[in-house]
Amino acid sequence: AQSVTQLGSHVSVSEGALVLLRCNYSSSVPPYLFWYVQYPNQGLQLLLKYTSAATLVKGINGFEAEFKKSETSFHLTKPSAHMSDAAEYFCAVSDVGTGGFKTIFGAGTRLFVKA
Amino acid sequence: DGGITQSPKYLFRKEGQNVTLSCEQNLNHDAMYWYRQDPGQGLRLIYYSQIVNDFQKGDIAEGYSVSREKKESFPLTVTSAQKNPTAFYLCASSPTGVSDEQFFGPGTRLTVL
């Protein structure tokens, strides 16, 4: 069965520091992986997605994520945090099972950026 | 502009009343979804539909109902049987396909008094 684990419900960094948001997944078949961002009282928007074309995926707003099959991880990084990055981030996994395809979202990690 | 609209943004209802949340998309997507979001619990799938006139229960369908009579519309009714309906509700759509991302509406915050 699919599952997604986001390590840390809250992460706090200083402006200009590295952002690292962790995501581990389980899937019985090759998965498709996504990172979404949610600003307060808004819907989610896609940051990036992995669909097996390349293990390092670049997304919007300077974010990127690396798919590591051996570690079943898909961690999200950004070299230098900006105040506008403060939001909640969701990792999601999608794969095909007996009932069709299904997408599972992680519980989310709220990113705080300190001035 | 293509996108997903949800209305209203905020909704207040008295306990025991049914309420319908609207979701419309003009992206020509086949699949549509309803999620419930509570603090610290991420997104939980209520119902989804991959084609007009067909829909399936998600993980927390009890106390909710949906219809999919038109490709662009997927309204959600929160019934009086839902024990704790106060939450943020998100509608999403996707082209259909395991590798497709979902496009989300702005959400409706429902408060039951």
Image (spheres, coloured by chain):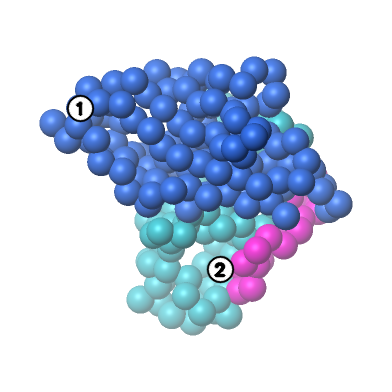
Chain colours: A blue, B cyan
Badge 2 marks a residue whose secondary structure is strand
- Marks 1/2: CA distance? 42 Å
Residue A35 screen position, x and y as percent: 51, 34
Q: Nearer the viewer, residue B101 or B23?
A: B101
- Per the rendering, the mark at residue A78 is none
Residue A42 visible in the displayed image = no
Q: Nearer the viewer, residue A104 or B33?
A: A104
Residue displayed at 56% across by 58% down: B44
The single residue placed furthest to the front in the displayed view is A70
Q: Which residue is mark 1?
A: A15
Q: How many marks?
A: 2
Badge 1 marks a residue whose secondary structure is loop
Question: Relative to B52, does residue A14 appear above or below in the rendering?
Answer: above
Quarter-wise, where is residue A114 in the image?
Answer: top left
Q: Tell me the kind of residue under disc 2.
A: Val
Q: Is residue B11 magenta?
A: no
Q: Tell me the kind of residue under disc 1.
A: Glu
Question: Relative to B105, does residue B99 appear above or below in the rendering?
Answer: above
Residue displayed at 41% across by 27% down: A77
**Mark 1 or 2, closer to the camera:** 1
Tell me the chain of label 1.
A
Q: Which residue is mark 2?
A: B78
Residue displayed at 47% across by 75% down: B84
Tell me the chain of label 2.
B
Figure quadrant of the C terminus of chain A: top left
Q: Which residues are magenta?
A: B49-69
